[in-house]
Image (cartoon, rainbow, N blue to C red):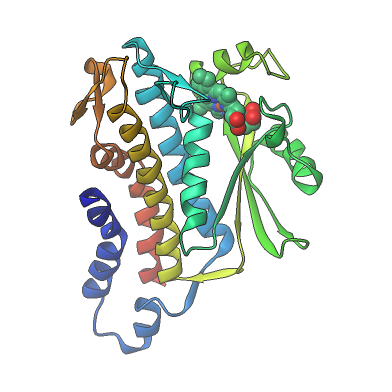
Amino acid sequence: MKTFYKLKFTYPLLASLIVVACGGVPEEKAELQGEENVFSVEEVLEMVSKENDVTRTLYTKAIVGKGKLQGMKFDEDWRKDKVEAGPLPALFLRGVATSIKRGPVPLGLYLGSDHPVNAANKFEGKQAELFEQIKKDQEPQFFYDDSQKLHTAMFADLASAGACVTCHNDHPQTTKSDWKLGDVMGATTWQYPKDSLTYKETVAVLNSYAKGTVDIYMEYLDEIEHFKESEKPEIGDKWPQDGKYLPTAEVFLDSVKKLSSYETMKHLVSLNKK
Ligand code: HEC
């Protein structure tokens, strides 16, 4: 829990720094206090999607990829009592989505494909249509989903690590067995009810994603705690590339922030130049 409280303040701290740095300009007050709508929903979903790309690649490569070399296991049934393993990358993402759904921020997240391993992840309707375009140019797609009354954004999910390709090609339930590195394997779909967001709402979206990451990662560490037969990796500040180690949730999220927050911060700070 300690970790979580610390993390919660990352973005608000940034916000207050900006306010302090630019204080004393009355006209800009409402904006700086975060009450004015300053970001379009597209911009915000793009920001959170970038954070997700970094988190997903880090988890896939540094935890799953390197962890496997140390004998750590990752399984789709990782939550079952008898299975002593961690979540696969797609299930890590679903864990983030579940945590966001439980919280107060109305942000939706879903990972789909036209050739899914799990039939429940198959795109339908408008999303299936737009996915065809994403496969061609890898550009994000935005639309307003009338039936759900939600602004929707879709971003390519690329085979960024060898592990993505081999695992999907070899999976017993696979519907396609010739995936290659760099292929568009699917897309993340993000949804939000409003067309523009205040500064505060934007920060809340980013925080809810970061909290989701910590929640699912902590569930994984908790699972390890209950291993009866498998060797337990040592949890601290080291990574699987150095041996039978796993980073704490705090160390994991710190790395995500180092890799991604520069872009996000540039975006948030650029407001003050208007
Ligand atoms: C060790 C196996 C494994 C690895 C590694 C893996 N996946 Fe998956 N992936 C799965 C399984 C199993 C599912 C279905 C999970 C579910 O929803 O039940 C899945 C689901 C998905 C989905 C949703 C559509 C579908 O196939 O059900 C996409 C898209 C996807 N993975 C892309 C990737 C990408 C990109 C990577 C690498 C960054 C990756 N996967 C790494 C096994 C794997």
Q: Residue 269 location, x and y as percent? A: 35, 63
Count of residue discs? 0
Q: Which of 2 and 111 is in front in this view?
A: 2
The answer to whether residue 185 is visible is no
The answer to whether residue 244 is visible is yes
Decide: is 49 above or below 182: below
- Rendered image quadrant of residue 192: bottom right
Q: Residue 214 location, x and y as percent? A: 35, 44
Decide: is 8 above or below 165: below
Quadrant for the C terminus in the image:
bottom left
> Going 76% across and 36% down the picture, which residue do you hit?
132
- Rendered image quadrant of residue 21: bottom left
Q: Residue lying furthest bottom in this view?
A: 26
Q: Left of 165 or right of it: where is 82?
A: left
Q: Residue 6 location, x and y as percent? A: 22, 54
- Rendered image quadrant of residue 144: bottom right
Decide: is 156 above or below 85: below
> Going 71% across and 65% down the picture, which residue do you hit?
149
> Going 44% across and 21% down the picture, which residue do you hit?
82
Q: Residue 45 location, x and y as percent? A: 54, 55
Decide: is 182 above or below 170: below
Q: Which of 105 and 271 is in front in this view?
A: 105
Q: Left of 203 or right of it: where is 44?
A: right
In which of the image's four quarters is ligand 1 placed?
A: top right
